[in-house]
Amino acid sequence: MSPPSTAPVVIETGTRRVFASALDWPGWSRSGRDEAAALAALTAAAPRYVVVAAEAGLPFDMRSSLEVVERLAGGSTTDFGAPEVVAEGDRRPLTAPEAERLAALVDAAWRVFDRVAAAAPAQLRKGPRGGGRDRDAIVAHVVEAEARYYSRKLGLRVFPQDDYRSAILDVLRSGRSGAPLAERGWPARYAARRIAWHALDHAWEIEDRSTA
């Protein structure tokens, strides 16, 4: 049996929340109250991420050891519940195969989200304080975020009714320099992990809240 692989991880620390994100696996990102809790949550999410990697046709080793390669100071968005800081590892140039791999994983995250949403009940179990969007509101939120905000970070001008996902994938495949893809925008690696994280975070939320 081959030894476990190593997954480089970036830690983003806010005042109330910490994110642990795998740099080379877009969407494999979880949070906790401190670094140890975030890394434990990331490890616990590995079986769920296997589904995404398989959807992209890529092997994923659940035994991968996590190696923290960067620690970043987060901000208000971190504490609100989203990774917000571009790491130095996100600025690495991409080869054509690497760019295609990132795009495949983002596309896989979208397909997983769509499949989970299609199978979920319209009304989801409420959170511990009685809150939380129902299925259709979550889907609308994801579409709005991708079309009206994330796409702008890639230099796109699209609308929710457009085939904006294809446009995003095309940009991710072509954005290989490591530089931001637009003024005040994101480099391709960070864009891939932020977009995939958002889709999967809500896909897993829907799954968790579809059960009694």
Image (cartoon, rainbow, N blue to C red):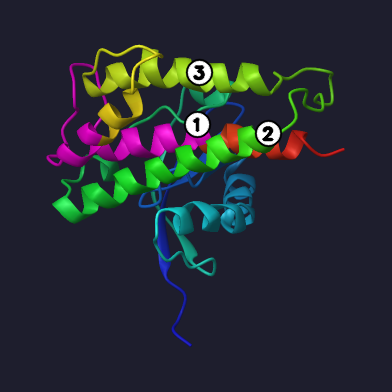
Mark 1 or mark 3: name the one nearer the start of the chain: 3
Residue at the disc numbered 3: 76
Q: Secondary structure at mark 1?
A: helix
Residue 154 belongs to the span the image colors magenta: no
Question: Mark on residue 185?
Answer: none
Mark 2 or mark 3: name the one nearer the start of the chain: 3
Q: Secondary structure at mark 3?
A: helix
Q: Nearer the viewer, residue 188 or 157?
A: 157
The residues bearing labels 1 and 3 have C-alpha atoms spaced at a distance of 17 Å
Q: Is residue 104 left or right of residue 188?
A: right
Q: Quadrant of residue 185?
A: top left
x and y, in percent, of residue 74 in the image = 45, 28
At horizontal 44% and vertical 84% (from top left) the residue drawn is: 2
Q: Residues within 10 Å of mark 1 (few under 14, many from 20)?
A: many
Residue at the disc numbered 1: 198
Q: Is residue 95 visible?
A: no
Residue 181 belongs to the span the image colors magenta: yes
The residues bearing labels 1 and 2 have C-alpha atoms spaced at a distance of 12 Å
Which amino acid lies under the numbered mark 3 shown in the image of this protein? Ser
Which region is colored magenta? 170-199
Q: Secondary structure at mark 2?
A: helix
